Amino acid sequence: MIDFKAVQSLDPRLKIGAVLLLGAALWNTGWWGLCLCAVLLFFLFALAGRFRAETGDLVRRFLLFVLFWMGLKIVLGVVRGEPLGGVLSGSLFFGFRLFLLLLTGLALAVTTSARQLGQSLSWVLRPFLGRDRAWKPALALALMTHFLPQCAEAFGTARTCLSMRFPHAPAYRKALLYPQMVLRFMGQKTWDRTLAVTVRGLDEASAWVPGFCWKERDTVAAGLVALAGAAVFML
């Protein structure tokens, strides 16, 4: 019986490779391939159980982002004089693929910690940059991954504060206050993260030495990933 903890315990290098393979497959497949990928992602998120609040908020933001680009694609197609049926079909296919790509990245973030992602990057870059320099891009990637959900949280907090403190403020006033509040929240988060990195000793090369151990289950999972990627490519 496969559970979510088993997926989380897989080698992070395997999970990164799986995301890259699936992402490439999504750009070279048709409707059936997209549907198969959607089923695989649904199965993965079903194993994860209930979404955390910030994860569900990210999914909603992904959907709004996709709908915006779908609408823009429809408008541009109509302006160019393309048949409406073809424009709608192409826009739907584009939006479905873009949404799955975003969910694929989210699946990696859900199943892999920011530090594991950084250690994986350090493992890749060490032969080229050396141990003394490979940890710096690893730390940057880990911080960026860690800050993405916090950015979404900062936007939500700023929106809530504006609606509670200035419910009757004009739109232009809110448009000026909103980015200022977000930047202030993120500035506080940045200071907290800086202290956390220093206290935990993450600003040293020794903290980013990969401790991965390839196991038999990783080999089995790699075979399943390869089969899934090939199926998405061919459909």
Image: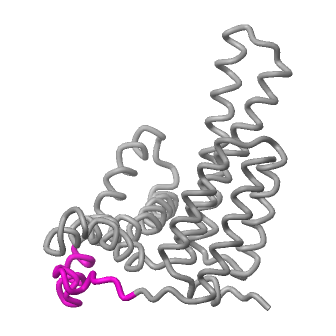
Is any atom of residue 74 visible in this view?
A: yes
Q: Position of residue 77 (x, y in %)?
A: 69, 17
Q: From this view, report whether residue 56 is shown above or below residue 175.
A: below
Which residue is found at the position 28% from the left and 83% from the top? 209
Which colour style is shown? one colour
Does the magenta-highlighted stretch encompass residue 66? no
Q: From this view, report whether residue 174 is shown above or below residue 197.
A: above
- Tell whether 139 sits left or right of 214: left
Q: Which is nearer the eye, 222 or 84? A: 222
Q: Which residues are magenta?
A: 191-211
Quadrant of res 127 = bottom left
Q: Position of residue 153 (x, y in %)?
A: 47, 67
- Tell whether 12 sits left or right of 228: left
Quadrant of res 19 = bottom right
- Tell whether 154 sits left or right of 38: left
Q: Position of residue 210 (x, y in %)?
A: 34, 83
Give the main secondary structure, helix, strand or loop, of the magenta stretch.
Answer: helix
Name the residue at the left extreme.
132
